[in-house]
Amino acid sequence: MYPMCSFGIRKRQNKTDDELEMTMVCHRPEGLEQLEAQTNFTKQELQILYRGFKNECPSGVVNEETFKHIYAQFFPHGDASMYAHYLFNAFDTANNGSIKFKDFVMGLSILLRGTLREKLEWTFHLYDINRDGYINREEMTEIVRAIYDMMGKYTYPALKGDVPQQHVDAFFQKMDKNKDGVVTLEEFIVACQEDETMMRSMQLFENVM
């Protein structure tokens, strides 16, 4: 289940209005057609996604606070704020503090319908908090702790406080092949493809996106 898909489905009678608004959001006349070509969504699916996006975000852009508020609704038993912060940054590819509809559907297209490599690349960039092209232990620990915090009572108190760190240690032992203290994109992809348990873990994380 992808909470971000909650930018829901509300029927609007005039599809021309949707296309006009889509054009305005994309800042170019060929906005809808271009998004259809750039994503794995059909024109009809893009229209449905846009209606929901516009309903939740009338201005056509989402800032981080709005994003956190929307995301928190799906995890009422935990604290989703930190994970939503990292997820927002992953969608905010321009690093300008806002997510436009194009940013949203480009990311969602990968998460829902991308190839395995595309999904793993997207997940790698989520973990690469400082965007230096590597994942270090601190970055992975922050993301894993954010996921545990978000799941709330579904993980605590059954899990001890050091479980997130144990999770990270196990990941790094398998991923950091050359033992240089960081994980590269290729190390990340190879490790996930070679290890079924790790792949299931990555898919679990994907499901909270």
Image: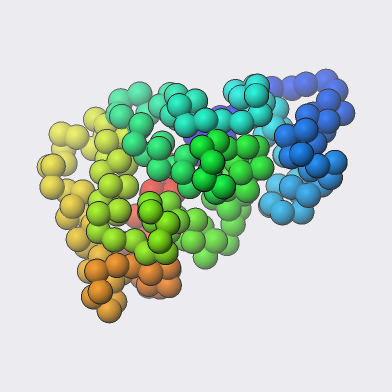
Which sits in the foreground, 162 or 179? 179
Is residue 70 at all visible to an observer of this figure? no
Q: Residue at x 69, y 52 (%)?
A: 40
Residue projecting furthest to the bottom? 178
User: Position of 98 compared to 124: left or right?
Assistant: right
Q: Residue at x 66, y 42 (%)?
A: 102
Q: Residue at x 29, y 54 (%)?
A: 140
User: Position of 120 compared to 144: left or right?
Assistant: right
Q: Quadrant of residue 8?
A: top right
Task: Give how far across and how far down residue 73 sits, in percent.
Answer: 43, 24
Q: Residue at x 17, y 48 (%)?
A: 163
User: Position of 86 compared to 197: left or right?
Assistant: right
Task: Give how far across and how far down residue 7 sits, in percent.
Answer: 60, 29
Q: Quadrant of residue 6?
A: top right
Task: Give how far across and how far down residue 145 sits, in percent.
Answer: 26, 43
Q: Quadrant of residue 150?
A: top left
Task: Give how far across and how far down residue 94 sits, in percent.
Answer: 56, 47
